Image: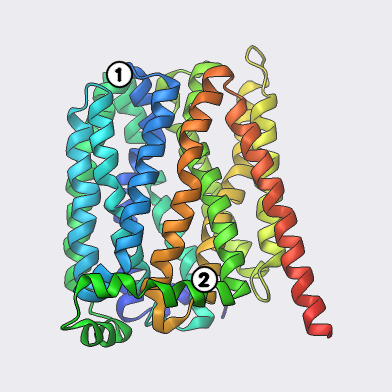
Amino acid sequence: MDNSLITTLKGLKGNPKACVYTEPLWGLSINLCLPYASVFMLAIGLYDAQVGLIATVLMLSQVVFAFLSGPIIDKMGRRKATAIFDFIAWCIPCLIWWQATGFWFFFVAALINGVLMIPHNAWDCLLFEDAEKSQITKINSLVIICGQLSVLFAPIAAILFSQLTLVPAIRILYLNAFVVMTLKIVVLYIFSRETGMGEIRLKESRGKSFFSLVTGYGGVIKIIGKSRGTLFALVITALVGIVAMVNTTFWPVIVSRKLLVPDYLLPMFPIFRSVIAIVFLFFVIPRLTTGELKVPILTALLSYSIGQTILILIPIDSSVKYPMIFLSLVFDGFGLGSLLALARSLVALNVDPEERARVQAILNMLVMAVTAPFGWIAGILSGLSRDFPFILNLCLLAIGFFITLIYYFSLSKKALN
């Protein structure tokens, strides 16, 4: 048990401990709402293409704020930037979603929600900069597990759906998200401290204009271009981001609109997926990540592909419909949960520690720029057939599989030479 996640959890100190221990509040706030956002939009009267357009608007907004995040974090500090911009990016949109009645509410909320790339970058720096490099993959797994702990409260969503119907129930969940997320921000700020690298960057950026920090991105791009590991991490992170966005947005749509699953049953599926993800992250991923990440990445890509294939093949009117949905979630829970943790680990392991904020800013910007069109594309595809977004995912996962094989083959060939 020396290498177990439980041992890692008990041994956390400082900022990694503050970040991981407060992360369950994310699961009890935002993660309770996200699985139902698309069906909420459809229930209010939006079309599939509009749902996809909102996802694209969110991604484009993230491109802008991802670009700005590096200089902002270096000027403000990791701790302060996390607190201020987490509130702007999540708490304010929660209030808008709570009162939303049409397309433009979601449009404005998506523009504001794009600010999340600033605290996303700042929080990653807060989490990793003072952590031991050997513990990064395990810490990432703990973060994913903590985010999945909304599973414990998902039955409340099911009760709300059955008693109040979908729309008023989700409004309550958004209001809850505002309160709990605000609590998370305050608690994390109190128990965290500025990182060692953050202190250095604060001193280095003092007296420099924001514009001069932005123009310094040229050197950062050269750093990224020279690192094959960082470029590989960028490609895998982009593919995982696209697949996760498409799945998060349109999984509830295919289940409720094509497979005709009643709304009050929808919370049961995220519960099952979360349990599967937690089990695999606790007991499987630590055993797979003792060496290079090739095997766990390939395994997760294959597992997720199987889950998406099963979902597409589920018959609408059949006694096997629900067993097949749960079977798809077994592969889905392991695949997506593992890919999210592994993609973050790839970035954390390959980024230059002295330029983490600015390198991650550029990486996040590029990922969002590549991901952005796929929300709109998937929305159009879903309007044609509920299956098409998931066929798109299968193609992307296949690309990721072959790129991973090529990358690690080139590494082994280089080592032999």
Residue at figure coordinates x 27%, y 52% from the top left: 115
User: At which x and y percent is residue 43?
Assistant: 34, 18
Q: Is residue 268 left or right of residue 208?
A: right
Q: Residue at x 23, y 33 (%)?
A: 97
Q: Is residue 139 left or right of residue 199?
A: right
- Say whether residue 153 is visible: no
Q: In the image, is residue 21 above or below residue 54? A: below
In the rendered view, tell whether residue 50 sits above or below residue 208: above
Q: Give the quadrant of the C terminus.
A: bottom right
Q: Earlier in the sequence, mark 2 or mark 1?
A: 1
**Residue position marked by numbered label 2 in the rendering:** 138
Q: Quadrant of residue 120?
A: bottom left
Q: Is 313 left or right of 1, judged from the image as shown?
A: right
Mark 2: amino acid: Lys
Pointer 2 and pointer 1: residues touching (CB < 8 Å)?
Answer: no
Quarter of the image for residue 57 reads top left
Q: Which mark is residue 44?
A: 1
Q: Quadrant of residue 209?
A: bottom left
Q: Is residue 243 left or right of residue 366?
A: right
- The residue that appears at 43% across and 59% down in the rendered structure is 364
The residue at the point 79 percent across, 76 percent down is 412
User: Looking at numbered disc 1 in the image, what kind of residue is underneath it?
Assistant: Ile
> Where does residue 4 sit, x and y in percent of width and height?
55, 73
Q: Nearer the viewer, residue 292 or 211?
A: 211
- At label 2, counting other C-alpha atoms closer than 10 Å, the crowd grade (few under 14, some 14-19, many 20 or more) is many
Helix, strand or loop at mark 1: helix
